[in-house]
Image (spheres, rainbow, N blue to C red):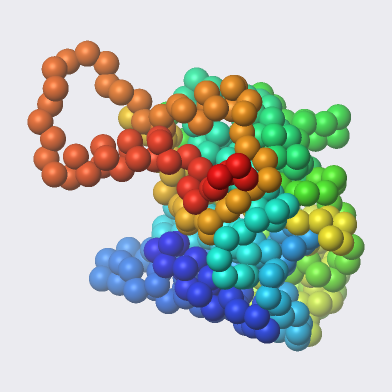
Amino acid sequence: MYAEALQFVLSECKPKAKIVDLCEKGDAFIRDQTGNMYKNVKKKIERGVAFPTCISVNNTVCHFSPLASDETVLEEGDMLKIDMGCHIDGFIAVVAHTHVLQEGLVSGRASDVIAAANTAAEVALRLVRPGKKNKDVTEAIQKVATAYDCKIVEGGLSHQMKQFVIDGNKVVLSVPGPETRVDEAEFEENEVYAIDIVTSTGEGKPKLLDEKQTTIYKRAVEKNYHLKMKASRFIFSEINQKFPIMPFTARALEEKRARLGLVECVNHDLLEPYPVLHEKSGDLVAHIKFTVLLMPNGSDRITFHPLQELQPTKAIDNPEIKAWLALGTKTKKKGGGKKKKGKKGEKAAESADAESMDVEPNVTTSEE
């Protein structure tokens, strides 16, 4: 269902389309589609938006999902990052995809930055597997970005996900540094991760330019505080009723009270904001995010969207990166004779083999 939602939003992305309208359409599509599932079960099943639709353009890194009054529109040639998520009964699938608003092949630095994010995502898919460590992934994606003369954007985290938990304790750090350390962790079977890769043609050190652009928040469930303002108490009560666990957009709240109330809630750590960050003007930022299940027979990437045809100015010639990309995503069973496969089994095997080979879809090298 995430695939249909992403494809729907992508099909609506045209020059002069208002970004807020596109975000609203994405969220409405997810609500409608999930609302039609499990209608006849007796137990009430929570479902809907797990992460509000965001469309961040060009040097804007992430989390741009503006208020209804915002007039920002798309333009021909914009680089769009579409970020969204859905859930059924708290089981979450998230995805982010990068698309240049143009016909035909994408070339130059725009192609480099998308290819860097995509190749880093493919390497991560092959290294996020039982027995590997989170630091292995962090080191590998740096090398991929460098090969394309790009940077991994600082501050990004790939999180383990659990039922009703979009940001679990096990994380993969995008860029190591003295101020951003995480506990070393080993991936284990039957875990689920949101692998989040953001690349930039700039320095990879984004800034918060305007706090008023922040519209996405998540309830910090372990925090409590007696709010002083009436508007804050009203908004916080609304949030607890409508969005007790998943991230939400301020558009879904009563707007006048929300502006006042959200500030006090954030100041007392009752809400975690998702800030809108920017690289320098003229820089290009690409974002690829996928959900992966670590199954006994290998890694299952359950959210993915094919890219436009790319013609990067750089080619991968680093043997270490090539070796990572050559790894399969499925593990072969040890011992035993050949078992007969039904048609379904054959199809799944073909699909797995194809995925292990097709690591750079639609990428044309500059030499060709």
> Looking at the rendering, in which quadrant would you find the N terminus?
bottom left
Camera-nearest residue between 155 and 244 = 155
Image height check: is 229 above or below 98? Answer: below
| Residue appearing at x 81%, y 70% in the figure | 213
Residue drawn at the location 85% of the way across and 34% of the way down: 179
Instruction: Examine the rendered structure and indicate whether residue 285 appears above or below residue 73.
Output: above
Q: Residue furthest front?
A: 368
Could you tell me which quadrant the C terminus lies in? top right
User: Does residue 212 appear to the left or right of 133 in the view shown?
Assistant: right
x and y percentages locating residue 205 in the rendered image: 85, 46
Q: Is residue 229 visible?
A: yes
Which residue is the extreme one toward the top?
Answer: 335
Q: Position of residue 27 (x, y in %)?
A: 54, 73
Q: Residue at x 37, y 66 (%)?
A: 44
Residue appearing at x 31%, y 43% in the figure: 351
Front-most of residues 365 and 20: 365
Q: Position of residue 229 (x, y in %)?
A: 85, 74
